[in-house]
Amino acid sequence: MATKPKAIEVKVYNVGLGDSILVSFHTSAAKNNVFRMLFDFGSIGRNPDSPPMMKIAEQIVEDCRREDGKSQLDVLIATHRHLDHLSGFGGKTGQFLEDNMLPPKRIIQPWTEEPEADLPGGSSDPNSGSAFMRQSMVEAQEITESIMQEVVRRRSIGFDRSTDDEVWFYGSKNLLAVSGEIDLAEAATRDLADEVASFHGFSSDAVNTEQITNRDALERISRWKAAGSKVEYVSSGFKSKATGLIPGLQMQILGPAGPDHWDALKKEGRQDELWARLAGFADENADDNGKMIAFDQKYGPYGVPPIFPQAAMERRSHGNKDNVRWLVEKLDRLRGSQLLGFVRELDSHINNTSVVLLLKFGNFTMLFPGDAEVGAWHWINQKGTGPTSSFGLPLETILEDVDLYKVGHHGSNNATPILSMWNFLAKDRTAKRPLHCVMSTQWSRFENKIPNQTLWQTLNGDKQFQTMATSGPPSLTSDLPIALNKKWRPQKDGKNTIAYSRMFEVAK
Amino acid sequence: MSGSVPRSAKTRPLTIIAQDTAVLDQSAKPLLTTVNIPAEQLAPGPSGYRIRVIDYDASTGTLYEPENPAGDGYYIDHFADRDADELVQNPKFHQQNVYAIAMKILGNFEFALGRHVSWQFDTHQLKIVPHAFRQKNAFYARELEAILFGYYARKTSDPQNGSLENCFTCLSHDVVAHETTHALLDGVREGFVLPSLPDQAAFHEGFSDIIAILSVGSSPDLIQRIMSGGERAQSKGLTKSDQAISVSANYDHTDDNLSNIGQSLGPGMAIFTLAEDMGSKGAGVHGSGLRDSLNIKPSRDLLGQREFQEPHRRGELLVAAVLRSIIRIAERRCYVVGVQNSKEPEEKLISQRQLAECVAEACRNMMSICIRALDYLPPVHLTFGEYLSALLTADYELVGNDSKYGYRAIIQDSFESYGIVPAADSPDGIWGGSNLKSWIRLDRTDHHAMMFDRDEMFRFLWENRKALGISDDYYTMVTKVQPSVRIGPEGMLLSETIVEYVQSAKMTGTALTRCGFGRPRQLSANAQADLYGGGTLIFDIRGQLKYHIPQYIDNRERQTDLLRYVWEQGLVRANGQRINASFASLHELRTYCGNERPGWEESW
């Protein structure tokens, strides 16, 4: 009798602000009937009941233990290079995984992570879309670092409330410490720019604390590759051989936009919105040699010298006139917000390199979009899949059929775009035909950002959306967060919750 | 004394950059010109009674010394007859440049509207910051009561020299005019930054572009110099100012985009050259918006296309419709002049100077009509169709008989070629008003007090709410009572009082449903949504109501569409708090993204 899909278990590790989700595919075979796929392992901030990351690493090893006693993933998906998706593969937790598991059989990463040596011809064509995209990522990182250096200095000038929140988000050093990534002593030695640098996966030149940058996590993946893991660097439409490892699994890769997309952009001389933004900002802040302006500490919190030094007035003269001082204070704060706005955009740029996966097992369809934001969905919708998908249906129809949706980017504003994605996904849902939503998030003090409050209310308020989240807003009657759909089973460790899991029958 | 006038003078000339630093004179230096603005006792800044220049750079934390154009017994222009290259590097000249251009635009508004225009904040002086930060952006920020201009590094134009130079957005006439227009429009119609259908945000951008281009185009000297000096002009053999140009009464515009018209001789080329120069050589802040406007081929389907839902792109349709109108009006004017010039009926020739004057006159007239039309708009939730009716009404009120040049037919035809049809239900597209008089009661209100007193005006509104169709179930407030005196092209005076009232309501999702409004899917039962409506009343000099231009708050169909749109577009937060249009982010998008949008319109 042929092996048939039987059930899927989805296990969401309580990493806090980050992602780590294990999907176990159960088949009808008598032996070796469970196959495991892990989406990411990273965090930048823990929930009140999150265990240390090492505890979760230990649990992953256990959850992947096969009948022969060895622990191994069939497929590892590293959706994109942000710290909240990869941090667990670096540092001590990454070493633990490496020591206690066999290398994953197959690893899937976005094509942007492909080493140049692996490209056709052995090196990257400088005129290719691939090089174009890479360059833009490098610039994104450089620019972000420069901006954040200025932002950090501006702390002494002051921010408005929302800017302060965002700086806190990017520079969550204490959160890193409590989530077990670094110890408090180390946290005290790091500055905000380093935090941001590590969040974005900068090269080790950018920060001194090399052991916790994403580079470390990416290098671990490279070592697994050297030890035998097959690695696929994918873009929209890529036919993954991972399906051969899991009987009955269908997989469609919707994103990210591939090198062809960037080739076309380059050929047309068009500037993609993100690339243009980067190039524009880089040009404005470049010195005569085309390098980003080095912000010199001697100019204090502002970092750069006046453009008309001969006409500059003494700083103390600012306060002489009340209406001048009023504007100066407000303008300084507005400038801080502007700079953070750029960081946010650049951040989206990297989010949009996320691997976006559609999986179908038996009669159960799941959508895992990583942190892909609205720009990526526009592309997927308009260009990414052609008139029909590999499932033989238009994308819209496929989205209408999804049973489980991993809420993109921890529930942020832009990652569940209404027109190009959500309206299809939410169409015709009823309590009998619900959409199961999984949100790995941290209910932080951001107003309406992560998770977005309107999205939260939609997912949490209606029975047609059966939503579980690893964190929710404190209720009116208690300090405990409202988060969990009761059908999801918590796995406790003392006061901590290691993970939530739920089994879905998938047989036709 | 060069560059100075006695203090008894009513106006004073100040030197400015004519268009931007890329438009050069015959000695290959940036083209300078002077503008006449009201004389006033300026403080250092320059700081006057409406505009205060504060030169603070938030990127470097530097306050720069202010320009002081006051002199003993004279008003001084320190920059008259100075070397243009030197002025480009002089921050004090930058300060004067923004002050003078902003004052000129303010003057254009006050002339057209026939009254003073207040800013949309409590104080009297708009702050202008010419070097606010290092960034390729410029925007009006209501919360700072200011317009902020950025600067950025760019490679020098000399290909042999790869070094960088600072480029200043405050030296671009169209950028300064555009941002000043945003501030003025906000002063005239504060409700236009509320969350609404796409036309409203698009109008803010398109209208600001229109005023910017018409402000430059109103100078015949500049038009002539641009036509004589530009590469396109040379390629057409139009380098000699005495060369005669053949004009026709009927260019066929039906299928051409404006750039094709621009390839022909005549007014089209003048406007095209002007707009393209502004789009391509400006300080880069507005991307290629003006150029794109020229290339939009007329089609009635464009408004519904996804591409044209983004505010700037949609605003380009408005710009295109106005530019097309101006070209045809200028052609009509050229033709009339050509007939006067020519003895032979087939040969109608005009000089380049006459051509420039026809174009400038068309720009001046159109600018006045465009600004005056603001008074004939509803105070919230504007659509392009309402603006077209406002344009036609504004022109009709001052020029009852326009058979000579046929402005209104041209404007209506040009707008309709882009799918914009008058909102007014009348054959000529003008707002109706004749049926109002018999139902309106004036016997309980003091006609005189109504013309300046908001409470008395509210009494009128309350007494006549049924006749005007205004529901008394909603919070209602008279926000503006503004007497105005306008001067028509033939010298005719028109006295009107413009009254604006706004209605608003806060309703929960449940209440919306109960009251028969559609509830947006994103709005939960207990969260609140803001509803806005209102209207504009126009009274004549005798206190008779001429027009009532309403946007009824209880129009359930329209409000349902509106609510659905603003919630889907993420223009309001989950708690119902509105997110006003941010000119900073809108302009940033336009600068860096052109027409590629990161999809910000799809947030929750």
Image (tube, coloured by chain):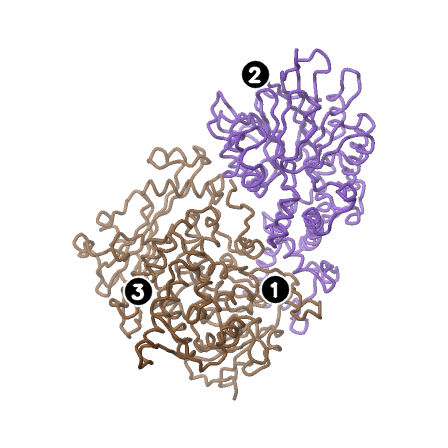
| Protein chain holding label 3 | B
Disc 1 residue type (three-letter): Tyr
The residue mark sitting in front, 1 or 2, is: 2
Q: Position of residue B234 (x, y in %)?
A: 52, 75
Which residue does the numbered mark 1 point to in the structure image? B151
Q: Which residue is drawn at 25% across and 47% down?
A: B469
Q: Where is residue B489 in the image (x, y as percent from the top left)?
A: 31, 73
| Protein chain holding label 1 | B
| Secondary structure under the numbered disc 1 in the rendered image | strand
What letter labels the chain drawn in brown?
A: B
Q: Residue at x 51, y 62 (%)?
A: B146
Q: In this view, does B195 lie to the left or right of A506?
A: left
Disc 2 residue type (three-letter): Lys
Residue B395's mark? 3
Q: Nearer the viewer, residue B149 or B244?
A: B244
Q: Is residue A226 left or right of residue A291?
A: right
**Residue A481 is at least partly visible in this image:** no
Which residue does the numbered mark 2 point to in the structure image? A508
Labels 3 and 1 share a subunit: yes
The residue mark sitting in front, 3 or 2, is: 2
What letter labels the chain drawn in purple?
A: A
